[in-house]
Image (cartoon, grey):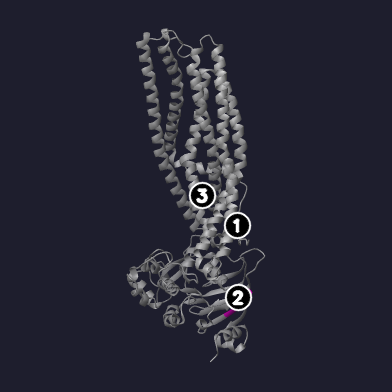
Amino acid sequence: MPRPMAKKGVFASKPKNLKGTLGRLVSYLKPHRGKMVLVFVCILLTTMSNVAGTAILAPLLNGLAAVKNTDDLILTGITRLDELVFQGVEGKLTYLTILVSSIAAVYVLGLLANYLCNRILVSVSTTTMTTMRNQLFGHMQRLPIKVFDTTTHGELMTRYTNDIDVMNEFIARCIPQMVSSVLTIIGVFVMMFVLCWPLALVMVAMLAVMLIVVKFIGGKSQKNFVAQQHAVGKLNGYIEELVEGQKVVKSFNHEEIAVANFDVINSHWQEVSRKANAYANIMGPIMNNVSHFFYAAIAIVGAFIAISSNEPLAFVGIIASFLMYIRNISNPIQQIAQQINLVFMAVAGGERVFELLDTPEEVDDGYVTLVNADVDENGNITESANRTGRWAWKHPHHDGGEVTFTELKGDVRFEEVTFGYEENKTVLHDVSLFAKPGQKIAFVGSTGAGKTTITNLINRFYDVPDGKIRYDGININKIKKADLRRSLAMVLQDTHLFTGTVMDNIRYGRLDATDEECIAAAKSANAHQFIKHLPQGYDTLLTRDGENLSQGQRQLIAIARAAVADPPVLILDEATSSIDTRTEWLIEKGMDALMQGRTTFVIAHRLSTVRNSDAIMVLEHGEIIERGSHDDLIAQKGKYYQLYTGMFELS
């Protein structure tokens, strides 16, 4: 069976920190201290009502026996009936009525407290998870591109869904049940020692056995629940990848291979889930058998104590209460055992979420900012609060002096740049190039030659370890990333449209653009014509990445989005790759108008689109092996000549 190609991510499995992760998770409840205190009070009242209700059962049963038999029976094993205020059958019935009423009142109080507890916990848990998701999403926006390049989308999505859901279960269900169970065990043991300490010692032995079982089984299941969470992430990642690429799967008849690969991943999830849940599921039956054994033990020991006593009927209610307490104490222990599994799942999910939250954010140590500029007749630059169509780099002075401005012209230079995405794996080797303001620079070469890497470095998606990239004479490491990227517009080969109208997607390039500016940008990209024929024109709703448009139409909208941004520098990464030849010809004039006066970097496999470039760089294995205009490179009859004549006939 073929095995899937694993995609290495930045989130690797590591030793788990149970205490630290739980502490960090519980810290999210700090803003709800008051509500959590009220929750614990409600849990305490609920627990006390259950324990007290069972405790009242002993005098109630003894009282019933007293009414049935004699006026002089021991009610509680301590106080005689004829020593009470109530005398005779009528008094005993009044006494029993009070006991029954007390039980009813206690259970009603517990019911109300339990209801209030659940209402508060729902509010706290949903609010906490909303806060966590907001924090996670906000942090994700500040992560470096490397995280998204090396981690599947499904892996990231699992943190928002499955991992946070199990933490929600931990807060909403696990915490209250654990607290309730512990309080119930404590309360039951206190009441048992009050009623009859010999029988209480039997219960202590029962508790010790149950704790040993819980510790053994819990230890076995912990590592498997952690593995289960990681397996779910891989499973979701593969499903997301295959759903997105379903057309490719069908085009190459890879359905069987896709199923086989899915089988491997799903079988791994099944195996770790089976191991995790096997231990979790045997916990209940084992606990039941232990409680049944001690149920019989309590009955036997209780009967022996009653027979040995001078007044055996006095132990009827006590034995009945103890038998009830066995149920009361075995259920909480089983719940603790079950909740321990949920704790392990919450820890596994929490560590995956905190792993992402702890991933270092994109470092930005730049201090040069981009501002709107006014330039007078003498060339003096001042900052403007309004959009002027001209920009300048604002240099602050650390000594408190006056700021200086450098007009943004679009002069970009690479100086001996060497770069690799991974250590000891260089992608660019000592690359030097320049683009003067307004020039169109094209990069051509085979896949993997380093063309897209150059544009990634211009945007500072990755920082350069060796060499320098200067923008208008400024080292781009000194420019704030947000301002640097604001001066650039990119049209990528893989077009992504957001859910919203066509107008919204074009305006994404500049959120303060007017409708008229968006329409003008669409016209320059030659997108206006087809947009007008959409059902609602510019108000047509696009969903699922614009699935109701052709690939070429989506690309035209992406070009219009770049046009409305009106940047000094354009980066076109295979921007016309999805546009047919006729459409490509139609938008040539619009693209030329868009590039007029702007520095433009073009990556293209269609060499016909770069013929009019000011300079063409031919890359091979991360090095520039040829450079020059189209005519110069054709005359050299080198690599570019081979590429060009291999695709087109020279006229």
Q: Residue furthest right?
A: 424
Residue contact between numbered discs 3 and 1, judged by CB atoms under 8 Å? no
Disc 1 residue type? Answer: Val
Q: Amino acid at mark 2?
A: Ser
Q: Nearer the viewer, residue 170 or 492?
A: 170
- x and y percent of residue 114 in the render? 41, 34
Which range is magenta?
Answer: 617-622
Tell whether position 179 is magenta: no
Q: Is residue 490 left or right of residue 87?
A: right
SS at mark 2 in the image: strand
Q: In the image shown, does 334 or 336 lie closer to the viewer?
A: 334
Residue 533 located left or right of residue 631: left
In terms of depth relative to the viewer, which is nearer, 343 or 359?
Answer: 343
Is residue 436 among what the camera can see?
Answer: yes
Write down the quadrant of residue 210 in the picture. top right
**Helix, strand or loop status at disc 1:** helix
- Residue 51 x/y as whole percent: 46, 25
Against 486, residue 312 (above or below) is above
Could you give the CA–CA distance between mark 3 and mark 1, rounded to whole angstroms? 22 Å
Q: Which residue is mark 3?
A: 163
Say which residue label 1 marks: 264
Identify which residue is drawn at 49% across, 70% down. Answer: 494
Alpha carbon separation for disc pair 1 and 2: 47 Å
Crowdedness near tag 3: few (<14), some (14–19) or many (≥20) residues, C-alpha within 10 Å: many
Q: What residue is at 49 percent from the left and 67 percent from the top?
A: 484
Residue nearest the observer in this picture, 497 or 376 = 497
